[in-house]
Each structure stands twice: as C-alpha cells, then as structure tokens.
Image (cartoon, rainbow, N blue to C red):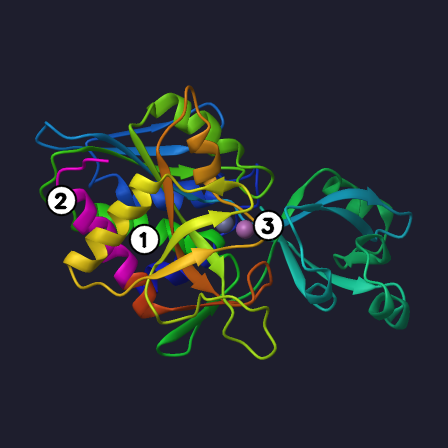
Amino acid sequence: MKDLMKRLTEAYGPSGDEEQIRDLIRAEVESLADELRVDTLGNLIAAKKGQGGGKRVMLAAHMDEIGLIISYVDEKGFLRAQPIGGLDLTTLAGGRIVFSDGAVGVIAPENREDFRKEPELSKLYIDVGATSYDEAKGRLGQPAGFLRPFVDLGKRVVAKAFDDRIGCVVLIETLRRLQDTPHEVYFVFSVQEEVGLRGARTGAYGVDPEIGIAVDITASGDTPEARKMAMKLGAGPCIKVRDSGMLAHPGVKDLLIETAEAREIPYQLEVLAAGSTDAAAIQLSRSGVPAGCVSVACRYYHTPSEMVDVDDVENTVRLLVALLEEPIEL
Ligand code: CO
Ligand code: ZN
C-alpha cells in the first residue's frame, strides 16, 4: 500500500483541478469496478454491484488537496495568491508550490520578522524564477498545490495531502479486497471538499445512498502540548461521534463499533472540535441520509508534512471490508 500512498500523495490536485489525481485513481479502480462514471462536478464514482438483497452504500473520500490560486502578477514577475482551503500560514514560507504543468514556485515572505509576528497570506509572494512580468503573467488564475515528496519512516509515513489521499487509498484497497457483498457499493472519490464539501453534495444526490460513510483524516492529540483530544496514531480507525459539521447517525456509529468489536479490529472514538468531512454533506442530501465517518488519525494536518500510521490505514480497510461483507440493519 505504501507505493500507492506515494503515488497518490505526490500527485497534483488542488480543489477544482482534480483531473490528474482522478486519472491516477481511475487507472487503479477501472478493472475492479462494475461501473465507472465521472459526474458534472468531477467526482469519480466507481460502483461494485453485490449479489443483491443489501443496501445502497456510499463511501466517500476526497481527491482534492489544499493549495493556492494565483491572484496577481506584479511588474517584476512575482506572484500573489489566495488560499484554496484552510492553510496553515506558518508552514508556507520557504516551501514550494507546483502548477499543473509541473512548474515550481518558491514561497517567500516580504519581511521575515513581520511575517513571523503576524502571519498573513498577503505578506507572502511566490517566485517562479521569472525575470519579467511577461514571463509570469500566464500564471494568473492558475491553482497550485504544494510540492513535497512522500517519506517512509517505517510504521509511520509522511506526505503532503494525506488529507485525503489516504482516504482514497483506503477506498481503492477496500474495493480491491471486497469479494462478496450483498450491497450495491458506490466508491465516490469526491472533488472540492476543502472548499466546502461541494463534490460530496452532488455525489450523494446522484448516488442517492441508503447509508453514507466518509473516510478522511482527523486531528490527533498525541503530540507535545497538543490540545486535549483522545485520538492518537496507531490506535486504530477513529469512528466519528461528532465534529463541527455533523453529529454521526447513531445507527451508523454503532454499526461501525459493533463490526470492529466482532472482528477484533482496534478502534477509537472521535470527537473533533473543529473541521468536518464529506459525511456532513451526505447526511443533508435529499431528505437526509444516515451518515457516519471513519477517520485515520493524522498529525500536522493541513501542512506539507502530514503523518499517519500504516497500521491505522490497514485496520481502516479491514473495518470497511468487514462492514460491507455483512447485511446492514440500522
Ligand atoms: Co482537509
Ligand atoms: Zn479531508
């Protein structure tokens, strides 16, 4: 799975510009799915039709990542940007961005001291190596992602965009391992999550599921001086109870807990103070959908060095495969 993690996290795909990452995922799932389609917003939807008698289940993981969009080019060819998603500004200076064509830019503060005191995106510019306005002007309006390689630390792995390429890895691996299921399972690789759960909204309307589960990352409280939070790396998939956008459907939450206990899969409960997932959009689709979420605990989320535990990823796959093999009664 680490090879897949590397390829997916290193791929380019800020919100609204998911074509490259979608092509990568499509190549992975094409031969595994009974049906494949891309909807109007760009969600990739792979269906596995079971033997029948089950439920219509939607699993969602977002393909998009946070990034920047170029909003201004000055007379010397330096760029200014606006955010795509929630950026941690303190991690940007000295970092690099990459455009869809592979071109790279360096992020620099106008004045280091001032930026340190009061980090603001307006105090950062991007240097693409241009020597004139004309050389850089074509970048106006273009999105960019961050540039960082995947690093294998053994039990732990580090990459940009584990949020939520790790969810995409989990969905692909679940589809690969799922042999017999009574359910009609829709694996939705969604777009534009980081700018407001937009892809999941149209995706859920289109699939019209009887149960929806998002797979995403969540924060962890296991680092020095961290906010008091129960989730930690290596303790199993986090079964969401609530976050700032959703109270998980109790039936879905209990189903996940019961499945984990029956199969002796380690799990933890997730109560997240800030942030939400595609499950919040699925839950409010049409006249409402029973929705829940399984998260992989992640350190340093929304920075270019997000860290997850490999066993957590494996156990998240095991949990979803187990859940889909059995009949579902909420
Ligand atoms: Co995110
Ligand atoms: Zn996410």
1 w.r.t. 21: above or below? below
User: Do the numbered discs 3 and 2 sit on residues whose CB atoms are within 8 Å?
Assistant: no
N-term mark: 3 or 2:
3
Quadrant of the image occupied by residue 310: bottom left
| Badge 3 amino acid | Ile
**Residue at image coords 46%, 66%:** 230
Secondary structure beneath dot 3 equals loop
Tell me the quadrant of the picture where the N terminus can be found. bottom left
Disc ID at residue 300: none
Numbered disc in front, either 2 or 1? 2
| Badge 1 amino acid | Val
Residue at image mark 1: 170
Tell me the quadrant of the picture where the C terminus can be found. top left
Residue 322 is covered by the magenta coloring: yes
Quadrant of the image occupied by residue 72: top right
140 w.r.t. 105: above or below? above
Secondary structure beneath dot 2 equals helix
Q: Position of residue 161 (x, y in %)?
A: 51, 56
Looking at the rendering, the stretch of residues picked out in magenta corresponds to 315-330
Disc 3 residue lies near ligand 1 with CB under 8 A: yes
Residue at image mark 2: 325
**Left or right of 173 on screen, residue 303:** right
Residue 284 is covered by the magenta coloring: no
| Principal secondary structure, stretch drawn in magenta | helix
Residue at image mark 3: 66
